[in-house]
Amino acid sequence: MALAIRIVYCGAGYKSKYLQLKKKLEDEFPGCLDICGEGTPQVTGFFEVMVAGKLVHSKKRGDGYVDTESKFLKLVAAVKAALAQG
């Protein structure tokens, strides 16, 4: 069964950032993830990433975008941990 990842992003312009991250995660974990994105209807500044229901990245809490290798590796570690738990 695929691991659920939910990304809530500001619908007023962050869709491309969501699609980039989705592709990067799918390339890293082919066939293992079920990634769904939700654009907010209003301007929110959101870029929130949940792995198996747990918030692991939050632009609103100061994490910014997933725009560096270290931020991406933090997500990779969270995905690996969730996959290991089954």
Image: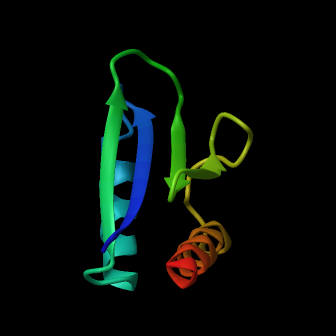
Which of the 4 image quadrants contains residue 21? bottom left
When the figure is inspected, residue 43 is found, relative to residue 70, above or below; the finding is: above
Q: Which residue sits furthest left?
A: 31
Which of the 4 image quadrants contains residue 43? top left
Which of the 4 image quadrants contains residue 39? top left
Place of residue 31 in the rendered image (x, y in percent of width and height, measured from the top left): 25, 81
Quadrant for the N terminus in the image: bottom left
Place of residue 6 in the rendered image (x, y in percent of width and height, measured from the top left): 41, 50
Residue 51 seen by the camera: yes
When the figure is inspected, residue 58 is found, relative to residue 1, above or below; the finding is: above
**Colour approach in the figure:** rainbow
* Relative side of 42 to 56, left or right: left
Place of residue 82 in the rendered image (x, y in percent of width and height, measured from the top left): 56, 73
When the figure is inspected, residue 77 is found, relative to residue 68, above or below; the finding is: below
The residue lying toward the viewer, choosing from 59 and 5, is 5
The residue lying toward the viewer, choosing from 8 and 83, is 83
Q: Which residue sits furthest top?
A: 42
Q: Which residue sits furthest right?
A: 62
Residue 11 seen by the camera: no
Place of residue 34 in the rendered image (x, y in percent of width and height, measured from the top left): 30, 63
* Relative side of 14 to 49, left or right: left
When the figure is inspected, residue 7 is found, relative to residue 5, above or below; the finding is: above
The mark tally for this picture is 0
Q: Residue at x 39, y 15 (%)?
A: 42
Q: Residue at x 39, y 39 (%)?
A: 14
The residue lying toward the viewer, choosing from 26 and 14, is 26
Q: Residue at x 73, y 38 (%)?
A: 61
